[in-house]
């Protein structure tokens, strides 16, 4: 039996960051990973999608040069075919491989940390069994950081050939033949559906998104979903919102038919395509992980925890995508790891590190970002608020890029004159949101934000304009409840 201070299951962002943090502080750590270090994020999530979306953005910029007579149709078409081929996948895999090598090297050279490449199963409140070797690891604490996997509703035909999840397009070990199609139906217009649609479109595929709820990215503020729908439709990506998929049918002529119904009109339609991407959410990866006798409470597979990440068994914790209430984001998984590191190292088991706001970002063109409260959330929670907006369309850097529509919407506290939340659409929204998150966390007053100097020309100048608009607005309007 091997004894450790902490045994962690899963080496995605949650498990790796926790393992490194604890081992660097002198704790003896066992990190158990059944697949590749880096988890979903590095191997079939954040990094491969963003590598491909970088190509999509470059392609879009090249196409915008056509309008200025600075490029030619033939160049754009040639470039598009390069972006769609094996070279694009090699680029994706090079980016992922470089990052994974870096992580593996870091895990290897970290003292006090032992990486076990094996499937772990929790068989007691302090015991983890490695399924392939039968080895038993014992920890004062066990941490579940087992992440999530794709999930889909019980749609008849979901198991037909030609129906894929994002793993088929993003994992370097998947068959490249999956890319040989011209027309795709994407079921689910959440973050994965939107990001994948943008890449497929940029390489010349015919894309239809079917989203059951009434806008794209329905987990975000409505204005962001509507703005993205408009931008997608303008590019030629077809979007049907309020359209619930009911069945997938194999067509005798080849390809697949996707039967969907609009919830408002009850009208039914059939969309035909070569393949289907199922982008309907993810479920916690805990099915094979827990002996029932251990007594860890779960809710649809997610581990129920208290605010200290502790499960119903006091020595067992859960962080990242596997815990109930997670936003399923890599940076939130890393934040959980940072906070649990502090909790496990603290002698005071009532000290809870402060939780900052967590931004949500969508890396489409245009980019979307959101942090803190939306107008809708303030209304529901009866929090006094007012909003102020700046469009980014006339920003000099935006104009140079082609002048697409964009905005920054601020949700402000009329009494304290601080930010409560923000929603952004446009270039660099996913970077600019950090400044606004800092302002929310540190409760920086609007007049202090207004006193900042933004570089010129920069996208951030629009942040200054939004803050100015908020200050001007409070002079004439004091309540939004
Ligand atoms: P994971 O990264 O899923 O890692 C869990 C690890 O545990 C896996 O390696 C798994 O093999 C291992 N494991 C599971 N069970 C066992 C077991 N029994 N024994 C041993 N090992 C086990 N988030 C963002 O913030 N930004 C993005 O841009 C973004 N893009 C995404 C794009 C896609 C297509 C997808 C699918 C997700 C994306 N996400 C993004 C979400 C992000 O990938 C996850 O939130 C993040 O990976 C969660 O980290 P985690 O450590 O909790 O779990
Ligand atoms: P999601 O929950 O964001 O979206 C799934 C969508 O599918 C929902 O909008 C839902 O209404 C729709 N849907 C479900 N059943 C349907 C049906 N029968 N017909 C039509 N539509 C249907 O899930 P996802 O897009 O699979 O992403 C999973 C998670 O991965 C997200 O929660 C996100 O946090 C994470 N992720 C993050 C990023 C990022 O941060 N940029 C990128 C990709 C994924």
Image (tube, rainbow, N blue to C red):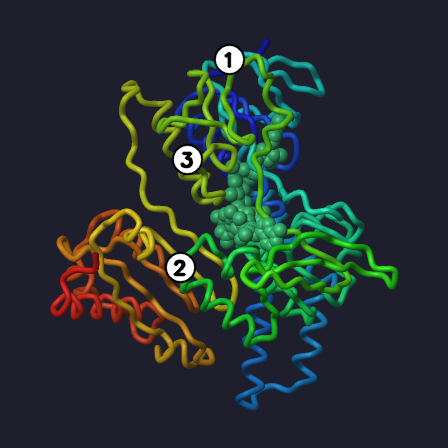
**In the rendering, at what x and y percent does residue 314 appear?**
42, 16
Crowdedness of circle 1 by 10 Å Cα count: few (<14), some, many (20+)? some
Residue 246 higher or lower than 298, as above or below: below
Q: Residue at x 52, y 33 (%)?
A: 322
What is the C-alpha distance between the residues marked 1 and 3? 21 Å
Residue identified by numbered label 1:
125
Residue identified by numbered label 3:
336
Residue 451 higher or lower than 3, as above or below: below
Q: Secondary structure at mark 2?
A: helix
Question: For the C terminus, which image quadrant?
Answer: bottom left
Q: Secondary structure at mark 3?
A: helix
Q: Nearer the viewer's eye, disc 1 or disc 2?
A: 1
Residue 69 in sight from this viewpoint: yes
Horizontal side, residue 102 vs residue 155: left or right: left
Crowdedness of circle 3 by 10 Å Cα count: few (<14), some, many (20+)? many
Residue identified by numbered label 2:
431
Horizontal side, residue 430 vs residue 416: left or right: right
Q: Secondary structure at mark 1?
A: loop
Residue 65 higher or lower than 355, as above or below: below
């Amino acid at each position: 039996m091997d004894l450790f201070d902490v045994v962690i299951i899963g080496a995605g962002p949650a498990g790796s960051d926790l393992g490194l943090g604890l081992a660097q502080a002198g704790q003896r750590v066992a990190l158990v990973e059944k697949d590749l270090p880096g988890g979903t994020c590095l191997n079939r999530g954040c990094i491969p999608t963003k590598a491909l979306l970088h190509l999509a953005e470059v392609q879009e910029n090249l196409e915008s040069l056509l309008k200025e007579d600075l490029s030619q149709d033939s160049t754009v078409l040639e470039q598009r075919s390069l972006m769609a081929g094996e070279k694009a996948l090699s680029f994706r895999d090079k980016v992922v491989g470089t990052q994974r090598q870096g992580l593996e090297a870091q895990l290897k050279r970290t003292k006090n940390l032992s990486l076990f490449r094996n499937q772990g199963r929790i068989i007691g409140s302090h015991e983890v069994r490695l399924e392939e070797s039968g080895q038993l690891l014992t920890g004062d604490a066990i941490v579940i950081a087992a992440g999530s996997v794709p999930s889909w509703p019980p749609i008849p035909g979901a198991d037909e050939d030609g129906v894929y999840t994002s793993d088929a397009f993003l994992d370097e070990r998947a068959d490249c033949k999956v890319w040989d199609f011209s027309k795709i139906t994407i079921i689910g217009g959440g973050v994965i559906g939107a990001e994948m649609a943008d890449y497929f479109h940029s390489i010349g595929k015919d894309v239809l998104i079917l989203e059951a709820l009434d806008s794209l990215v329905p987990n975000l503020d409505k204005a962001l979903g509507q703005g993205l729908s408009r931008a997608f439709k303008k590019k030629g990506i077809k979007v049907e919102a309020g359209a619930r998929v009911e069945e997938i049918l194999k067509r005798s002529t080849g390809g697949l038919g996707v039967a969907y119904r609009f919830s408002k009109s009850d009208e039914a339609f059939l969309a035909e395509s070569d393949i289907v991407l199922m982008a309907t959410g993810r479920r916690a990866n805990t099915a094979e992980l827990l002996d029932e006798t251990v007594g860890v409470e779960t809710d649809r597979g997610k581990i129920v925890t208290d605010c200290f990440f502790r499960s119903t068994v006091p020595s067992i914790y859960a962080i990242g995508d596997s815990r109930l209430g997670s936003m399923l984001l890599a940076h939130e998984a890393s934040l959980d790891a940072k906070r649990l590191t502090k909790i496990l190292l603290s002698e005071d088991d009532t000290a809870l590190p402060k939780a900052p706001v967590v931004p949500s970002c969508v890396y489409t063109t245009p980019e979307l970002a959101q942090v803190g409260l939306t107008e809708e959330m303030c209304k529901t929670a009866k929090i006094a608020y007012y909003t102020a907006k700046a469009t980014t369309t006339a920003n000099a850097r935006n104009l140079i890029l082609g002048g697409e529509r964009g905005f920054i919407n601020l949700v402000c506290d009329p009494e304290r004159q601080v930010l409560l939340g923000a929603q952004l659409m446009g270039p660099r929204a996913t970077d600019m949101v950090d400044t606004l998150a800092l302002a929310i966390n540190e409760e920086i007053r609007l007049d202090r934000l207004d006193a900042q100097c933004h570089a010129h020309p920069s996208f951030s100048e629009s942040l200054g304009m939004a803050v100015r608009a908020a200050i001007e607005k409070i002079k004439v309007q004091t309540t939004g409840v």
